Image (cartoon, helix red, strand yellow):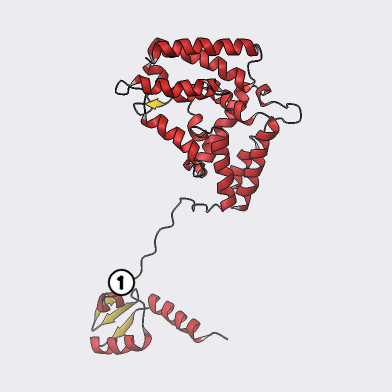
Amino acid sequence: MKKLSQLLESVNEIDSLLEIDFKDKESFQKYQAKHKMRPTTKVNIAGKDTTVGDETGDKPKSEKPKSDKPKPIKLNSYAKKALSDIETDFEPYVGLSELIRRPDSTIRNKVVGHIKSTENFNGYIRRLYSELEESGVSQEDLSTLEGLEVDSDNIINLSDVPEDELVSKVKQLGKLVGRLGGVKNENFDLRQLSKITTRYTNRLDENIDMKKHKKEIDKLMRGSEWGNEVYDYIDIDIEDGRKTGFDILGSKGKKLKQMLDTAMSYESGVYTGMSEREYNDLNRKVQIELNRVFK
């Protein structure tokens, strides 16, 4: 048996299809007070065709068109942490989303230097997959993520993965992480944030005293991964990303970049044709070149 509300709804649906005649406006108002017809219901009042809405001033509610845009995904705290960990662990200084804009050799050296093994690399992928699956991320994104794992059964060191394969996977990962929210780098600790702030406020341009940069770089040159640190310090974006610090330094910058690239390759384990003694000799050569640039 239908409920009263269902019956009234049926009456309203019929009203909207049929035109109801009223001899005058007063009789229409009495009928409307009892039955509450829809604004779209057609009526005839004293021989004039109209609608209930036109007579009462009530406008039908317009249905909002459905958007084709997918609803934003609400990531849980575990998924956000997994995204942030990849963003910062793959490249602690500028973040993975920024790193993928750099040259392929730089991307490889950085990721190999920080992540080290194929098992570690896949561990980040699997953890992120698990957390994103719980958050309801699309199957397309999950399938993309699953395809980014490297061959950890036959390859132990990440440096042994072919460069084009590794760089391609890192770029895809960086884009995915950036799109899903990892680009915010919310979990940078104070020490990392301080480094980034210092680098981006003390730009390598003609308005900054080079002695300030020299003092900072001297500290970095004494670190265990001085090639990585100094490269990051100089390789900042200038003029809205059109140039880097190396570009500003001209031919000297080009020479420095080549030497620091070699140092980074040794530090990340990519370049095995260099002894520790040669690495230390390179440190001294780089220091001499830096002294010529930063006076």
What residue is drawn where x is 52% and y is 36%?
A: 175
- In the figure, is residue 35 to the left or right of 117? left
Label 1: how many residues lie within 10 Å, few (<14), some (14-19) or many (20+)? Answer: few
Judge by depth and name the residue closer to the eye, 166 or 99: 99
Q: Looking at the image, which residue sits at the far right?
A: 153
* Residue 255 in view here: no
The image quadrant of residue 270 is: top right
- In the figure, is residue 97 to the left or right of 43? right
What residue is drawn where x is 50% and y is 81%?
A: 6
* Residue 39 in view here: yes
Judge by depth and name the residue closer to the eye, 110 or 100: 110
Helix, strand or loop status at disc 1 = loop
Judge by depth and name the residue closer to the eye, 33 or 187: 187
What residue is drawn where x is 56% and y is 52%?
A: 77
Classify 242 as above or below 46: above
Q: Position of residue 50 (x, y in %)?
A: 27, 76
The image quadrant of residue 215 is: top left
Q: Position of residue 261 (x, y in %)?
A: 53, 17
Classify 28 as above or below 79: below
Give the labeled residue for mark 1: 59
Rendered-image quadrant of the N terminus: bottom right
The image quadrant of residue 45 is: bottom left
What residue is drawn where x is 41% and y is 20%?
A: 214
Rendered-image quadrant of the C terminus: top left
What kind of residue is marked 1? Answer: Lys
Classify 100 as above or below 291: below
Q: Position of residue 291 (x, y in %)?
A: 42, 12
Counting every numbered tag in the picture gives: 1
Judge by depth and name the residue closer to the eye, 276 or 147: 276
